[in-house]
Image (cartoon, rainbow, N blue to C red):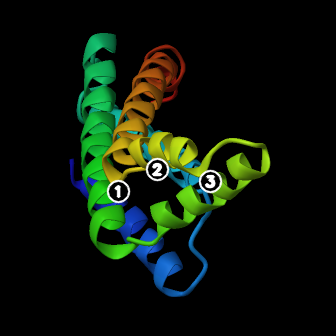
């Protein structure tokens, strides 16, 4: 669990550094960092489990990986909600304005275009989508990496 919390702290620090340095990632550009963090957390928690008990069972390896990936997903979802609610409060209004202009150029009335976009572009929705995406990626990684640990890496110890 320490590795997971350390990884979360590093990702949060990177995100805040990029934001305050004026190089905030656009859209889903930062998801690659999240995917790398989840792979790292799942792999090394399984590695630590095998170092502790060479005969650790496959379900235990998978459970440990998924538990740590889920903790990462929950805490990152919470951070993203706080980040867009309190720190980067201009991101969603800017996105809404860009899309409203594009929809108005396509011939839609401003009120109709704005209504749907305001409901969609919220910190809660963005954090929820990120949480469920990270949870799904974490589950997949927990399965694949547990298989790799169980079938391949155990033999190398």
At horizontal 21% and vertical 47% (from top left) the residue drawn is 1
Q: Work out which residue is located at the far bottom of the displayed protein and give it.
A: 21
Density class for disc 1 (Cα within 10 Å; few <14, some 14-19, many ≥20) is many
Of mark 1 and mark 2, the one earlier in the sequence is: 2
The residue tagged with tag 1: helix, strand or loop? Answer: helix
Residue 14 place in picture, x, y as percent: 46, 72
- Count of labels shown? 3
Direction from residue 96 to residue 71 in the image, left or right? left
Q: Nearer the viewer, residue 134 or 105?
A: 105
Density class for disc 2 (Cα within 10 Å; few <14, some 14-19, many ≥20) is many
Q: Which mark is residue 52?
A: none
Of mark 2 and mark 3, the one earlier in the sequence is: 2
The nearer-to-camera label among 3 and 1 is: 3
At horizontal 33% and vertical 75% (from top left) the residue drawn is 87
Q: Nearer the viewer, residue 71 or 29?
A: 29
Residue linked to disc 2: 37
Of mark 3 and mark 1, the one earlier in the sequence is: 1
The residue tagged with tag 2: helix, strand or loop? Answer: helix
Direction from residue 92 to residue 122 in the image, left or right? left
**The C terminus, quarter of image:** top left
Please say whether residue 144 is visible from this viewpoint.
yes
Q: Label 1 vs label 2: CA separation?
A: 15 Å
The nearer-to-camera label among 2 and 3 is: 3
Residue 10 place in picture, x, y as percent: 39, 67
In terms of image quadrants, where is residue 21? Answer: bottom right
Q: Which mark is residue 80?
A: 1
Q: Label 3 vs label 1: CA separation?
A: 24 Å
Residue linked to disc 3: 100
The residue tagged with tag 3: helix, strand or loop? Answer: helix
């Amino acid at each position: 669990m320490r590795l997971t919390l350390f990884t979360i702290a590093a990702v949060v620090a990177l995100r805040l550094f990029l934001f305050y340095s004026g190089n905030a990632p656009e859209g889903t550009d930062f998801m690659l960092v999240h995917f790398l963090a989840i792979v790292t957390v799942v792999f090394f928690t399984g590695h630590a489990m095998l170092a502790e008990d060479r005969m650790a069972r496959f379900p235990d390896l998978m459970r440990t990986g998924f538990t740590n990936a889920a903790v990462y997903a929950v805490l990152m979802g919470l951070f993203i909600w706080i980040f867009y609610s309190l720190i980067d409060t201009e991101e969603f209004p800017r996105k809404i304005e860009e899309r409203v202009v594009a929809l108005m150029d396509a011939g839609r009335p401003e009120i109709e275009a704005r209504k749907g976009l305001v409901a969609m572009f919220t910190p809660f929705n963005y954090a929820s989508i990120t949480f469920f995406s990270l949870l799904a990626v974490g589950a997949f990684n927990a399965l694949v990496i547990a298989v790799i640990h169980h079938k391949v890496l155990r033999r190398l110890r």
